[in-house]
Amino acid sequence: MTQQKDQPTTRTTLADQVYQQLKEDIGNFVLFPGDRFTEHELCERLEVSRTPLRQALARLQQDGHVEVLFRSGWRILPLDFQKFDQLYDLRILLETDSIKKIISHPKGTHQSEATRLIQSLAEIWLAPVTARSADSRQVSLWDEEFHCVIVRAAGNDEISRVHWDITERIRMIRKLDFTKRPRIEATYTEHKKILQAIIAGDATLACELMAVHIQASQREVRSITLLQLETARRRAYPDAA
């Protein structure tokens, strides 16, 4: 499976590259919530001039990742758990609606594409227990792809775009969900049941299972502690601690 990525309509600029790098650093807790930094510090670390850096920071500010501080540089915004809670609620609406669309599609070209996409997920999540991965990073990537593919299979590009935006905004905290072995096992079990219900054409059951699955992840987010964030930071970037 290929993971959905940002697809610019023009060639990638240096500012685009800086933006992606900083977004990854934020998502991996290399740049930690609450961290302060100057443009000079980042220019030295990334080996770029101020112009592309400022363009990248402006985009990150618009995305809600950073804020400019009067005469004292920039700051990574603290995690807004109330906003995350709202985004998880929106995920439930979008993903359960996508399941209904997948199952109700009339026979035709799009149904064939939806079937192909669901089958690509089944190859991972319906595999034997002995074939399951214990690699938290890999499972995290597969989990993200699972939810994005289900929305994509519904065939509404605008809903997919909104869902992808949500996915990017919650990526950093979803990674924390896979630092615990029981959550990895639960994800395999829950994804398997959801796929089996979709393949069987049981929209009611599939939607119920999806809602419960997302709510379980939502509860994990609500229980995130400062210690978990610090641990994630040390794993991603030992010199930052």
Image (tube, grey):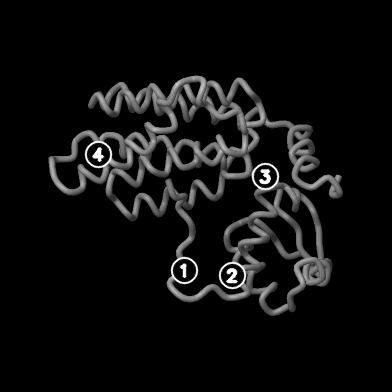
Q: Could you tell me the amino acid type at mark 1? A: Pro
Residue 223 appears left or right of 140: right
The residue that mark 3 highlights is 79
Mark 3 or 4, closer to the camera: 4
Could you say which disc has been placed on residue 8 in the image? 1
- Between 85 and 95, the one nearer to me in the picture: 95
Dot 1 crowding, Cα within 10 Å, few <14, some 14–19, many 20+: few
Task: Kindly identify the residue that appears in the image at 56 percent across and 49 percent down.
Answer: 169
Query: Is residue 238 visible from the viewing direction of this image?
Result: yes
**In the drawing, what numbered circle is on residue 16?**
2
Classify residue 182 by image quadrant. top right
Badge 2 vs badge 1, beta-carbon distance below 8 Å: yes
Q: Earlier in the sequence, mark 3 or mark 4?
A: 3
Q: Circle 4 — which element?
A: helix
- Give the CA separation, mark 2 to mark 4: 35 Å
State the residue position of label 4. 101
Q: Residue at x 48, y 60 (%)?
A: 6
Which of 158 and 112 lies nearest the eye of the viewer? 112
> Does 26 sit above or below residue 177?
below
Q: Is residue 228 left or right of residue 149?
A: right
Determine the CA span between mark 2 and mark 1: 9 Å
Mark pair 3, 2: CA separation: 24 Å
